[in-house]
């Protein structure tokens, strides 16, 4: 069973907003056993909608559309679909009253434009939107497929997918299972990882498909299986992942959703240890990763963003001599930042970063992307340098990942 997801709106095409709807819909359809054949974003014109929906109906059994259902004249999805399915628009009394009551609670007048939202194609099944005024529509096609039109507002769309669309799809079609399981690895490049697990990969059952998904200092290994008995496939895929512990056990972080900062979080919490962070080029990114997790207050003592040399000296105690002789981006300064953060926060461990995130500020000896990271522990201070490319966002992301890994390396055996 295959689906096409169509998002409608010029605001998506010009980059004014990010299309998160197709991601959410894809996940929900996959969980229901439906494979995504295509995702398309189009402008809000009758011609684009007619052409794209028509082509999708020929290629896939399920077509999910979001957007273009508002009360204004430039929202024409409903009118276009009514024309495609040769249906008249009729006022739906029950849904019209729902729109009126919802607007009344919000203190908004019920105008003719709002009333038009309850004008719906006669041939569709109305999908009640308890959370908004744009109503969902379900159309049965002559080929036995379905076309579903949903609001573009993400939380409204998600409620309709959960409450109406997915249950109806499961009742309408005989759906087979799809299983995706992902293992998170760290500290090993994708090419080297592929070499290390090549024999394991070659021996996978034919119905399992492996994908490599690299990110800063992390590679996700995703096993996928289609048209399967979900519980059996899940168990067999987990058994395959278990075999990797003998090959790359030291590089395994955990299953999908597990991050290295979570592993550090668990160790610090379990051992009753305290953590502080001193950041220059990463600008608070590392601290935010830890404080975003519930329970961080048990161990997280302080996060200091020390961009200027004055703050590095006055707050963290970095020596004038180190700054003068080696510069702010140096092993000596990274070490002193970590040790200073550990000292002033009364922490057991501290992370520090100092580097050149760019796009300017580099030199021949220290080009953009040069970052020193340090971890101060109860017994020693460790420091590493990495050149992390030229893109500012990537440098910050990669530096944060490397710094957290440096701390994890010291903690992982506890």
Image: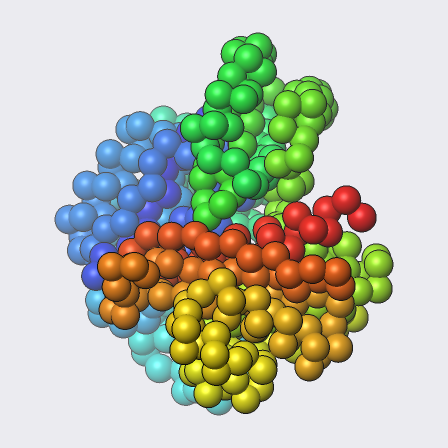
Give residue 2's quadrant in the image: top left
Q: Residue at x 35, y 58 (%)?
A: 369
User: x and y percent of residue 366 in the render?
Assistant: 32, 61
In the rendered image of this protein, does residue 107 appear above or below residue 396?
below
**Relative side of 261 to 134, left or right:** right
User: x and y percent of residue 310 in the render?
Assistant: 46, 87
**Relative side of 54 to 156, left or right:** left
Say if residue 158 shows up in the picture.
no
**Relative side of 171 to 349, left or right:** left
98 or 234: which is nearer to us?
Answer: 234
280 or 53: which is nearer to us?
Answer: 280
Q: Residue at x 55, y 13 (%)?
A: 199
User: x and y percent of residue 169 in the render?
Assistant: 53, 37
Q: Residue at x 57, y 61 (%)?
A: 374
- Residue reaching furthest to the right: 271
104 or 34: which is nearer to us?
Answer: 34
Q: Residue at x 29, y 59 (%)?
A: 365
Give residue 324's quadrant in the image: bottom left
In the rendered image of this protein, does residue 100 appear above or below residue 287?
below
Say if residue 414 shows up in the picture.
yes
Counting labels gives 0
5 or 369: which is nearer to us?
Answer: 369
Q: How is the image coloured?
A: rainbow
- Residue reaching furthest to the left: 47
**Relative side of 336 to 323, left or right:** right
């Amino acid at each position: 069973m295959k689906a096409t997801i169509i998002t409608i709106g010029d605001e998506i095409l010009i980059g004014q907003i990010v299309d998160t709807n197709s991601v959410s819909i894809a996940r929900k359809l996959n969980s229901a056993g439906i494979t995504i054949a295509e995702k398309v974003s189009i402008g809000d014109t009758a011609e684009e909608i007619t052409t794209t929906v028509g082509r999708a109906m020929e290629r896939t059994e399920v077509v999910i559309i979001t957007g273009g259902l508002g009360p204004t004249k430039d929202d024409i999805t409903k009118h276009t679909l009514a024309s495609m399915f040769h249906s008249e628009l009729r006022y739906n009394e029950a849904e019209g009253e729902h729109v009126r009551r919802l607007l009344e609670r919000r203190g908004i007048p019920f105008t003719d434009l709002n009333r038009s939202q309850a004008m719906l194609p006669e041939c569709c099944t109305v999908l009640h939107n308890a959370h908004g005024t744009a109503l969902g529509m379900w159309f049965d096609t002559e080929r036995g497929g379905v076309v579903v039109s949903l609001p573009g507002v993400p939380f409204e769309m998600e409620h309709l997918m959960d409450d109406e669309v997915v249950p109806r799809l499961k009742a309408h079609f005989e759906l087979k299972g799809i299983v995706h399981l992902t293992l998170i690895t760290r500290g090993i490049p994708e090419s080297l990882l592929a070499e290390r697990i090549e024999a394991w990969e070659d021996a996978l059952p034919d119905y399992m498909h492996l994908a490599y998904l690299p990110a800063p200092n992390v590679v996700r290994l995703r096993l996928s299986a289609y048209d399967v008995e979900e519980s059996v496939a899940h168990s067999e895929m987990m058994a395959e992942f278990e075999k990797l512990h003998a090959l790359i056990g030291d590089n395994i972080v955990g299953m999908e959703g597990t991050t290295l900062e979570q592993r550090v979080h668990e160790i610090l919490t379990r051992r009753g240890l305290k953590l502080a962070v001193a950041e220059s080029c990463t600008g608070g990114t590392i601290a935010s990763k830890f404080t975003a997790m519930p329970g961080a207050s048990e161990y997280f003592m302080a996060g200091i963003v020390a961009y200027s040399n004055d703050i590095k000296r006055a707050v963290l105690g970095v020596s004038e001599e180190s700054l003068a002789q080696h510069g702010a981006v140096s092993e000596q300064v990274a070490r002193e930042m970590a040790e200073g953060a550990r000292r002033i926060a009364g922490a057991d461990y501290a992370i520090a970063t100092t580097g050149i995130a760019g796009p300017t500020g580099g030199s021949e000896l220290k080009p953009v992307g040069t970052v020193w990271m340090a971890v101060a522990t109860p017994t020693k201070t460790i420091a590493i340098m990495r050149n992390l490319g030229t893109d500012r966002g990537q440098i910050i992301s990669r530096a944060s990942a490397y710094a957290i890994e440096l701390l994890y390396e010291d903690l992982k055996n506890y």
